[in-house]
Image (tube, rainbow, N blue to C red):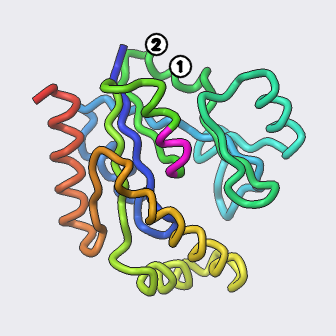
Amino acid sequence: MGKLVIISAPSGTGKSTLINRLRAEHPDLRLRFSVSATSRPPRGEERDGVEYYFFSQADFEAKIKQGEFLEYEEVYSGRYYGTLRSEVERCFQAGDNVIFDVDYVGAQNIKRAYGPSALSIFIKPPSIEELRRRLLGRSTDSPEVIEERVAKAAEELLHADRFDRVLINDDLETCYQDLYQLVSSFLSGS
């Protein structure tokens, strides 16, 4: 069985950028992205099965009842996110390690399920003000949604100490190098 790398961070902190770069620059780590499921509609150019598995709220809730999720959370009212058990198994069967991009609740559930075979990393923004600026700069969400995300981020930051390691993304290059060192060391067993 492979190992798991769990990355969690408030929306707008840069976790997708960091994960995508890590995978692109270090194929030797054999990190297969665990595609999460969600009940929210796709944004922009997002594609089903690539960025997320997109389900209606009713379909997502049916999969919960059928026990198809390793973890899930209703992150916003009516907006579920989760990890399908079948997705993790698909990655392991391919002989790969699995990298997750999940919220802090999901991260704790996965860590609990896999114990020392999983490394949990929380990425913090330099400040709430900088996070708000980054979210505004994306131009993908309404001001109300941005304020919802900022409020959620403040809550998430309270749980950072539950992770194996915490990184602060105040400089993308430094954060990336720190992330690479952590993940490489964990996967090699050193």
| Amino acid type of the residue that numbered disc 1 sits on in the rendered structure | Arg
State the residue at coordinates (48%, 25%).
113
Q: Residues within 10 Å of mark 1 (few under 14, many from 20)?
A: some
Q: Which of the two residues, 39 or 96, is positioned nearer the viewer here?
A: 39
Contact, CB < 8 Å: mark 1 with mark 2?
A: yes
**Whether residue 187 is situated above or below residue 148 in the rendered picture:** above
Query: In the image, is residue 94 part of the stretch drawn in magenta?
Result: no
State the residue at coordinates (37%, 16%).
95
Query: Percent from the top left, x then y, of residue 170?
Result: 28, 75
Q: Residues within 10 Å of mark 2 (few under 14, many from 20)?
A: few
Q: Which residue is mark 1?
A: 90
Q: Quadrant of residue 142?
A: bottom right
- The span shown in magenta is 104-108
> Left or right: 128 with respect to 78?
left
> Left or right: 98 with respect to 150?
left
State the residue at coordinates (49%, 33%).
110
**Whether residue 164 is situated above or below residue 190 in the rendered picture:** below
Q: Which residue is mark 2?
A: 93
Quarter occupied by the C terminus: top left
Q: Which of the two residues, 152 or 176, is positioned nearer the viewer here?
A: 152
Q: Give the SS element for disc 2.
A: helix
Q: Which of the two residues, 7 or 87, is positioned nearer the viewer here?
A: 7
How many tags in the picture? 2
Q: Give the SS element for disc 1.
A: helix
Quarter occupied by the N terminus: top left
Q: Which of the two residues, 44 or 103, is positioned nearer the viewer here?
A: 103
**Whether residue 99 is situated above or below residue 139 in the rendered picture:** above
Residue most extreme to the left: 190
| Amino acid type of the residue that numbered disc 2 sits on in the rendered structure | Gln
